[in-house]
Structures are given as C-alpha cells and as structure tokens.
Image (cartoon, rainbow, N blue to C red):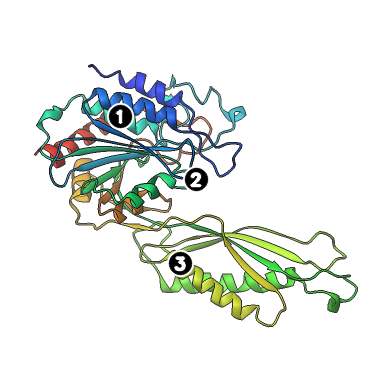
Amino acid sequence: MKQPSLHHMMERLIGAPSVSSVSPEWDQSNARVIDHLAEWCESAGFKVEHLPIEGYPGKFNLVASIGSGPDGLVLSGHTDTVPYDDSRWQTDPFKLVERDDRWYGLGTCDMKGFFAVVLDALQDIDLGKLKHPLILIATADEESSMCGAKALVETHQKLGRHAVIGEPTGLKPIRLHKGIAMEAIRLHGRSGHSSDPALGVNALDGMHLVLSELLTWRSELQQRYRNPLFAVDVPTVNLGHIHGGDNPNRICAQCELHFDIRPLPGMDLDTLRDEIDRRMGETLAQTGLRYERIALFEGIPAMDTAADSPIVRAAEALTGYSAGAVAFGTEGPYFNQMGLETVIMGPGSIEQAHQPDEFLALDQLLPAKRVIGELVRRFCID
C-alpha cells in the first residue's frame, strides 16, 4: 500500500488538535494524531501498539516496530502542542498553509512535522533488509505532564539501544540539556492591625528573608557548578512570581513565591529541593512563620549522553556539527533511563516553537530526510 505524500501527512497531523496543558480548559486528547500515525505505520509494515496512559484519560503513546534482533534505532517525538492564541495567528493554526517557502501550522516544527518527515524518508528504504529493529515512538503530553515518556519508563520496555528525538534543533545534534523544576514557597503568618506589629506575624517580612537566602544560594550554586558547553554555563534560579497580603493596613498573613531552577547535568533535583528546605528551615526558625514548599510539577532531569556514544558520533558525522547543549528540557533523560543512548535532533528551529505563526522552513525537509535515512541504514541495515 502506497504511503500518502509528505504534504498530506503534514496536513492531517496539523489538522488534528492535540493541545496538552495543566489547565483543564485547554487540555485535549491526542487520539486522532495517534490514529493517523498508526494507520500509516501499519501500511508500511510496522507492528503497532496503542498504549493508553493510566490516569490520563484520552492520552496515548504509540510504539511501532519493524525488524528484530539486538540494538536497533528509536525515532521518537511527542504528539501534543502547546495552547495557542488564534487572534495572534495570521492563519488557522490547524490548517497547513504554505507561504514564503514555509509550512505554517501549530505543530509544524514542534513537533508533529518530524513524524511526517520520518515516514516519508522511510519510503526510500527497503525495510525488508533490516538487520536490527527500527522503532517509531509517539508520546503524549511532553508539553505539560511528561506522562507519555514517564509511562514508557514505567513499562521497562527494551526499545533499542540508540534514539533520536526529533525536537526542532535545525538538524544540529544535542547531547546535553539542563533540567528544570518549578517550585513554590508559601509562608503562613498571622494577620493583625498594622498599628502594632506584635499583633501578628508578617509573612511578607519573612519572604524578604527567603528571597535573600535564595539569592545567596543561587550565587553559591553558580560558584560550585559550571559547564562551558552551555551558552549559560551555570545553573539558574529565576524568581518569577510573588503575591501576598490583601491590604496596606493589615499585617500580611500569607505570602507565596514561585521560581524555577535549571540545573546542569550532574545536579539532582531532589537534592536541590532538600537544600532549599534545610536552608529555609534555618533562616525562618525564629520568625514564628510556617514554611511550606510545593513542587509545581515533578520536574525534568538534566540530560547527558556520552560524547563518544555511537548515535552522537553518527549524528555529528552526518550533519557536520559537533553535538551541543541547550537550556530547554526534552524527553531525552527518560529515554536514557531506559538504557537508550539519546540525541536530540530534528528539523525546524526552537525559535519558532511556542510562537504564533509557527512554521517549518521547506529547505529543512530534504536534509532531514537524508539524515534520517542514513541513520536507519547505519543502525538497522549496515
């Protein structure tokens, strides 16, 4: 059965809304995208598994495999997109539009387009000659909960040895990225009339101490950890949101701060959280305030794939770029946890991701198909 054209596959994928979000009013199922991919993979001879994700109704992973034997190559991507503001789009986000040598649409570069490019590239390869397995993986909710990648880890599937996750990197291989955690610190005091500070316990005063201690800790982290492979070569702590109190003449009873942490490879998120709790406990010990830290989401670990791993060396040889490092998070560390050696590399630019009028430049298509084809030949045939 002949596969549909690259344009047709892109059109169908972009036309299947699959927003994931922590806000229920935005969150959608990815079932239609999974169904399209399953249909095309089956017609190409793959064995296809639909994997519902426990605890996430309407969310699915797809694992499509062909060939057998040891090692093998995984080509993976996420099926979801971020929310959108259609008033800021010049065209319908769910309609593929060609203009100025670009394909516009929500998910064109981040990252439904990768699936269409992969499936189109495979039409030029005799999959009957595979000596090692080729596995295509499509995950749910990378943009929100990471439930798809985490579910794969929990099943302990042996999925191969080498993996490429097709996030938009301009076809430049990435082997390291920072992790990310988002935390809240909530201080509980006691309200009272502002004419007498002894009538209450001021949470805003306490938050001043918290802010000072966090900035000191940030400075210490940046002295302890450094990696020159990153453009920002130190871990970062960003103070992003604060709110407290309700009136100028009332002692503030509660104050809350939100911040993010982006650790370098080798830094453990839970260890960092323990450090925060210990330092804040000492800082606030005599204030009468109750301290609470809430992880706003579980966090994404940093990723570090060895520079001498075969998939990294192959990606470098095929693209002409040395494998680099980025600050944004991916599903890569979860794939590494499953025993895969993982590189992040795909068509499109991260600068277009999460933006109105997201696009994939057409001059990325042929180079991407060439690189994907050569990786399949190198790891599954030759």
Pair 2/1: label in front: 2
Say whether residue 22 is left or right of residue 308: right
Q: Where is mark 1, residue-wise?
A: 117
Q: Residue at point 49% right, 33% down?
A: 29
Q: Residue 75, image x and y in percent?
A: 27, 39
- Mark 2 or 3, nearer chain start: 2
Q: Where is mark 2, residue-wise?
A: 144
Identity of the amino acid at label 2?
A: Ser
Image quarter where the N terminus lies is top left
Q: Residues within 10 Å of mark 3 (few under 14, many from 20)?
A: few
Identity of the amino acid at label 1?
A: Val
Q: Residue 217, image x and y in percent?
A: 53, 73
Q: Residue 72, image x and y in percent?
A: 18, 43
Compared with 291, 174 (above or below) is above
> Is residue 101 visible in the rendered structure shown here?
no
- Mark 2 or 1, nearer chain start: 1
Q: Nearer the viewer, residue 293 or 166?
A: 293
Q: Where is mark 3, residue-wise?
A: 270
- The quadrant holding residue 278 is bottom right
Q: Residue at point 50% right, 68% down?
A: 273
Say whether residue 33 is left or right of residue 214: left
Distance between the alpha carbons at the discs numbered 2 and 3: 20 Å
- The quadrant holding residue 50 is top left
- The quadrant holding residue 172 is top left
Q: Secondary structure at mark 1?
A: helix
